[in-house]
Image (cartoon, rainbow, N blue to C red):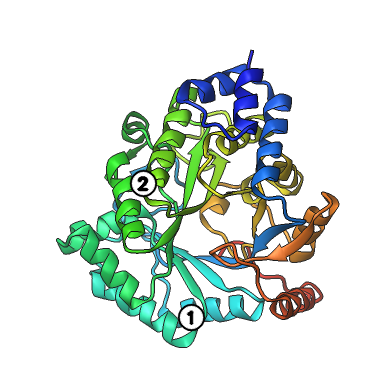
Amino acid sequence: MIEHILDKAIDGQRLSSADGLALLESRNLSAIGDAANRVALRLHPESYRTYNIDRNINYTNVCTAVCDFCAFYRSPKSDEGYVLPRDELLRKVEETVALGGNQILMQGGLHPHFKLDWYEELLQDIKSHFPSVNVHGFSPPEIYHFTKVNKLSLREVLERLQAAGLGSLPGGGAEILVDRVRREITRGKVLTDDWLDVMRVWHQLGGISSATMMFGHVETLAERIEHLERIRQLQDETGGFTAFICWTFQPDHTDMSHVSPSGAFEYLLTQAVARLMLDNVPNIQSSWVTQGLKIGQLAMLYGANDMGSLMIEENVVAEAGTVHYLTLPQIRAAIEELGYEPRQRDVFYQLVAPELERSAIEANLRREQTPELPVISA
């Protein structure tokens, strides 16, 4: 019986790890989803639900780590490796701004040769051309990799990147924050404590970040809960996570293609339990990029209060064969169909000024009326 656990969460009491595991094991999606929606309504009683406009720019696919779940990376010796020319990268930012975007999500592989000054110059170039754009960049595995390549402390690396223009850190590369899982599915990549320490130091420097979870592969249900507990513990300490996003493993074209993909039930159940467990993380973001429009919309009734990003470009998930493309009118309509006003936000979850929001809507409508739509992958 899970009713007493759900009542605790609805009343604002903290759930234990045992509580969270009991919820996942119950498989009672209806009751858990209802409780997650109630908690979301308590935390976000506003008449609106939010979305963002940004672009995922993968500046390189060259990576020294070997991740069995990744279809995107190429080894340093591969003929398919690339590094985006700087003018092309800046053009991508310019296109994003023209469509009303206020942020770019910038991530890449663990390139073996680039020193820290290369990344500093990259940030400075972006900020000099587009000073108002937030660079949401470099996941914890990348940051940890920078410390090793440059033989610098974590704090110095983050301080230098922050001074060069880095605005916030994405939660990429978390997968499952349990070392047993990480050792089984990846080699040459940061382990749990160091992933968390990157976020800890960044938060100590006044930075904000998102937290993520990619599940549905080799982890147990208890390990999903352990992941949520580690995020919650760090948030108690620093308060630097603005949002949590989870999605199911996409196995196609990976070395784990034999793993049966998790479906919508597992996604909605896990997200709902995350909303109940993460009582100190203010926002839960839907993952329509992996789930599609209808499940992404349904996620807004299972604990999410944010529809995620328009995602003008996405490459990593697309390489695994999952390509869901939504227009801005579709995202806004999905929110309106649930009875909420759709509002554009920034990385801090602050609402964009109405005149800027209207300008973005008009720009995206013009884009949809042209025969050549922007690609979801490069």
Q: Is residue 281 above or below residue 78?
A: above
The image quadrant that residue 36 belongs to is top right
Task: Please state, as top left, top right, bottom left or bottom right, where the N terminus lies in the image.
Answer: top right
Give the side of residue 195 with respect to residue 297, left or right: left
Which residue occupies the foreground of this view, 25 or 109?
25
Most distant residue in the left direction = 151
Residue of label 2: 237
Look at 53% across and 38% down and name the residue there: 249
The image quadrant that residue 350 belongs to is bottom right
Tag 1 secondary structure: helix
Q: Is residue 274 above or below residue 150?
A: above
The image quadrant that residue 332 belongs to is bottom right
Give the side of residue 364 with respect to residue 20, left or right: right
The amino acid marked with disc number 2 is Glu
Q: Identify the disc placed on residue 6.
A: none
Tag 2 secondary structure: helix
Residue of label 1: 90
